[in-house]
Amino acid sequence: MTLTISSDLVEAKKSKFKTTWRDCGSDDAIVRFRNIGLEDVVRIGKTTPVKVSLNATQSAEVPADSQVNIKIKKILNIFGNKLPVVVPCINGIGSCEASLCDIFKIHKKLVCTILEAAGHDCNCPSAPGVYNAADINYQLPFTLIPTAILSLGNGDYTLDMEITHNNKQIACLAMTVVVKFV
């Protein structure tokens, strides 16, 4: 027996989500997120950059061998029930775990764009200070993926990112994001 679910049933016609964020770090976390700016619906396309703003503080140097754990889940709406599906880690994109400096290497263009817009050098580990970068336009690397495949990615997502060192939390960020591939 095969069960086929049409995309009309899987994806809600109008998302009840909107882009939200919160700093979920402990009181003594080294990195504190003060503001994350994204549009309510993040439009991603082969020629459509994502616009992001960031305001964060880093009170001390984050050890280079800190671990970054990113969990991304797509929220499917199946017959009115929300089903979170983990987005796998593929080539450093998705639900991945790696050292801080490996994340810098994998996502060098994105990380350096943010750090340099905030007036800092692109080094791992990054220096303590205030990181304030407004209206950064970043083109995500989806140019080789056919548009029909990208459209399957439309929908609601949760993103949880935690940085730890020796089982001590360094930073934590939780987000909900509505994504529309254009």
Image: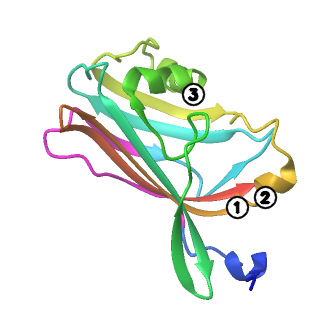
Q: Residue at x 55, y 25 (%)?
A: 106
Q: Which residue is drawn at 72% across and 83% down?
A: 9
Residue 61, by quadrant, is: top left
Foreground mark, 2 or 3, reads 2
Q: What residue type is labelled 2?
A: Ser
Q: Residue 163: x, y in percent?
A: 31, 37
Q: What residue type is labelled 1?
A: Asn
* Quarter of the picture holding the N terminus: bottom right
The residue at which mark 2 appears reads as 151
Q: Residue 69: x, y in percent?
A: 38, 41
Residue 99, by quadrant, is: top left
Crowdedness near tag 1: few (<14), some (14–19) or many (≥20) residues, C-alpha within 10 Å: some
Q: Give the range drawn in magenta.
A: 18-35
Residue 135 seen: yes
State yes or no: discs 2 and 1 in contact (Cβ < 8 Å).
Answer: yes
From the viewer's perspective, tell me whether residue 118 is left or right of residue 172: right
Q: What residue type is labelled 3?
A: Leu
The residue at which mark 1 appears reads as 154
Position of residue 33 relative to residue 114, above or below, is: below
**What is the C-alpha distance between the residues marked 2 and 3?**
23 Å
Q: Residue 130: x, y in percent?
A: 32, 26
- The colour scheme of the drawn protein is rainbow
Dot 2 or dot 3: first in sequence order is 3
Q: Residue 160: x, y in percent?
A: 40, 51
**What is the C-alpha distance between the residues marked 2 and 1?**
6 Å
Observer-nearest of 121 and 119: 121
Position of residue 51 relative to residue 136, above or below, is: below
User: What secondary structure is marked by label 2?
Assistant: helix
The residue at which mark 3 appears reads as 110
Q: Is residue 84 magenta?
A: no
